[in-house]
Each structure stands twice: as structure tokens, then as C-alpha cells.
Image: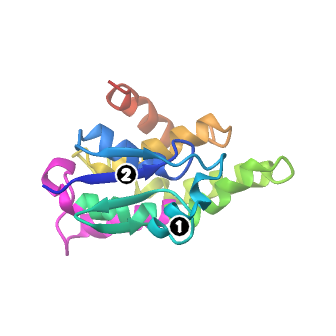
Amino acid sequence: MSEIIHYQDPQSRAMRTQALLNFYDIPHKNVLIDIRKGDNKSADYLKIHPHGRVPALSYDGQVIIESGAITLFLADLYADKMNTPKPGTPERALLYEWMLFCHASLEPQATLGFNPETKARGQAEVRRLLEGMASRLKGPHVLGEQFSLLDVILYTELAWYKTIGLYPEGLEPFDTFMQSHHERMKPA
């Protein structure tokens, strides 16, 4: 297998891709790009990621940007290990649905939580969006009976919301999901 280089800052969208790499014990080299120090705007890093964002992942000389694209790439590369649903199945469609929901619908509302003036609106929107997805949680795990990469992604996302005060406590089935996955997701 080719070397994986993961360019990341732990307080960024890279937490998702780092969670996958760590949870599934995928050999990789981490390169810290400290966005608070401006490492992401250096000329060298802009050659890796033209928008100066993290994460970025290098695999066999190919650089992949955007955390969703990196996640889906890893899901295909390590399909057996991550219990990635097969292409063309309803379960694969749910994987895409949840990934796009987290990245395109949920995250923009969550970013409102960083501004004290918009935090309450962000909290309300996160709750509203999750309420709408509650019926889409298929079982003890996001896709049903089998633990998959999607459980790692959703847990990581919601744990981050807890950390920044955006998690809507008292919202089922997400409270049960978080509680039931807590032990499994603890760092080793």
C-alpha cells in the first residue's frame, strides 16, 4: 500500500479524517498544519491545498482535498475494514446521504456557533436538522446492524458539537447513539 500523508489541524474539519485513520489503525504520516499560526497560508502548503484549508491527503503522489472526498476515498480504499457498503446498494446511498448531510447541511449551521451573536441560531438549526434526520438512523448504528465508517464520522461530528456547546441534548435517537458508541470511540 502507498504511503498516506495526512495534512491536518486537530481543531478543524480534519478531525473527521483523522478519526477514521486512527480508529481503523491505518498507517499514515501526520503533518500538522497549524491554522492559528498561518501554516495553511504558506507557499509550500498552498501547493498542496490551493485554498489553504485542512485536511489534505496525499496518496501515491495524488493529493486529495475536502474532508468529504478524503472520507469517501478512504471508505473505498479500506472498504472491508470500514464496512463500506457496496456501490449501487441502498446502504451506499445512505452513506452518501449522511456524508453530504453532515458536510453540506449540518456543518454550515454549526459554524454559526463560533460567533456569540449567532450561536443560538446555530443551536436551533442543528437541532432542527438532526430532528429531520432522526428517522434516517437505521438501528443501533447509522446504517443498521453493522458498525461502519459512518458511525465514526457521525460520532466525531456530534462529539465536536458537544465540545462547542451545539449538541441538542435530549434528542433521540442521537443521545442513545452517542451513549452506545462512547466506549468504542474512546482513543486507545
Three-letter code for the amino acid on which mark 1 is drawn:
Leu
- The type of colouring in the image is rainbow
Q: Is residue 74 visible?
A: yes
The amino acid pointed to by label 2 is His
Per the rendered image, the range of residues in magenta is: 76-102
Which secondary structure dominates the residues rendered in magenta?
Answer: helix
Q: In which quarter of the image is residue 178?
A: top left
| Residue 42 in picture, x, y percent from top left | 58, 60
Residue 59, image quadrant: bottom left
Looking at the image, residue 102 sits to the left or right of residue 122; the answer is left
- Disc 1/disc 2 C-alpha distance (Å): 15 Å
Please give the residue where the numbered disc 2 appears in the rendered image. 6
Q: Is mark 2 on a helix, strand or loop?
A: strand
Question: Considering only vertical position in the picture, is 26 above or below 179?
Answer: below
In the image, residue 96 above or below residue 128:
below
Q: Is mark 1 on a helix, strand or loop?
A: helix
Residue appearing at x 25%, y 69% in the figure: 90
Quadrant housing the C terminus: top left
Name the side, left or right, on which 61 lies relative to 186: left
Q: Residue at label 1?
A: 46
For the residue pair 128 and 104, the one nearer the viewer reads as 104
Marks 1 and 2: CB-CB under 8 Å? no
